Image (spheres, rainbow, N blue to C red):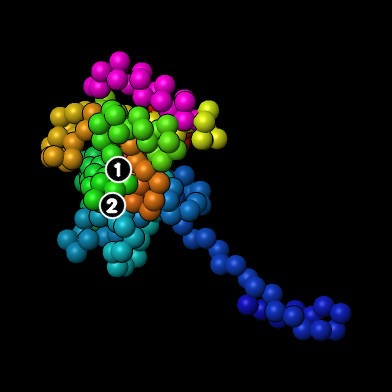
């Protein structure tokens, strides 16, 4: 906050803080939902801080696998963190796994909150009623089932939505089984609500991380 004079009257002018979240690879500034924070661990390793809770000086990298891999290759973390650190050559894969774990965790939370349904019948109903905010398929889902739910998505858009809900195909049935156990699915829908929206947010971030800035739902 600073004071200035206008017409002889002192007024308060709010000075907005400068966004200091700058990617150490691209040198571009951005919001935290488009960047990944890293810190130096006690053992001198580079640690991803996806939840933005770890203490100490941090640095930011654009939330894309290519950017993380480039930061490792160019040894940019030590310079940005101003300490001697060692970045795991597989850091890009570590971040991918953490993003997946975060998405799986949010799916479980949404399911317990009644904001994540599985099975083609329930998913079809959610799409047509306007309750769904995203549609998800296993990557190896049968195309007939995918086609039928695509039709339900289109029908929902024509009836209750302004547009079709986003569609994600990010994991195989086996991967979902290992990660979610009894909560695994071939077809699923995230429903409106905080937890359901959290699923969509994490699915979009994973899609961008794996496929780049132009990546989106299928």
Position of 159 with respect to 183 (left or right) is right
Q: Where is residue 191 shown, x and y percent of the image?
A: 37, 43
Verify whether residue 200 appears in magenta: no
Q: Residue at x 77, y 84 (%)?
A: 10
Question: Is residue 38 something that shows in the picture?
Answer: no
Q: Which residues are magenta?
A: 140-157
Magenta span: predominant SS is: helix
Residue 72: x and y, percent? 30, 44
Q: Is residue 93 above or below residue 28?
A: above
Name the residue rendered at 25%, 55% in the picture.
47
- Location of mark 2 (residue): 113
Residue 140 placement, left or right of 218? left
The quadrant holding residue 11 is: bottom right
Q: Residue at x 50, y 51 (%)?
A: 30
Q: Secondary structure at mark 2?
A: loop
Judge by depth and name the residue closer to the eye, 81 or 32: 32
Residue 125 image point, x, y percent: 36, 33
Q: Which residue is mark 1?
A: 116
Residue 150 colored in magenta in the image: yes
- Left or right, 30 with reference to 45: right
Give the spatial CA distance, label 1 vs label 2: 8 Å
Taking the image as drawn, is residue 114 in sight?
A: yes
């Amino acid at each position: 906050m600073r004071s200035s004079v206008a017409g002889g009257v002192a007024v308060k002018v709010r000075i907005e803080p400068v966004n200091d979240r700058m990617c150490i690879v691209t040198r571009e500034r951005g919001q935290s939902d488009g960047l990944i924070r890293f810190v130096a661990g006690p053992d001198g390793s580079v640690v991803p801080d996806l939840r933005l809770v770890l203490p100490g000086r941090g640095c930011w990298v654009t939330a894309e696998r290519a950017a993380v891999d480039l930061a490792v290759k160019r040894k940019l973390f030590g310079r940005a963190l101003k300490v001697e650190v060692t970045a795991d050559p597989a850091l890009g894969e570590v971040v991918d796994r953490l993003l997946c774990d975060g998405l799986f965790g949010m799916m479980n939370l949404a399911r317990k909150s009644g904001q994540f349904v599985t099975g083609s019948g329930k998913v079809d109903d959610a799409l047509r009623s306007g309750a769904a905010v995203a549609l998800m398929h296993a990557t190896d889902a049968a195309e007939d089932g995918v086609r039928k739910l695509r039709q339900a998505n289109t029908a929902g858009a024509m009836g209750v939505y302004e547009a079709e809900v986003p569609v994600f195909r990010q994991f195989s049935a086996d991967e979902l089984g290992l990660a979610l156990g009894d909560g695994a699915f071939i077809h699923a829908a995230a429903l409106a609500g905080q937890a359901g929206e959290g699923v969509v947010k994490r699915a979009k971030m994973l899609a961008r991380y794996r496929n780049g800035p132009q990546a989106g739902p299928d």
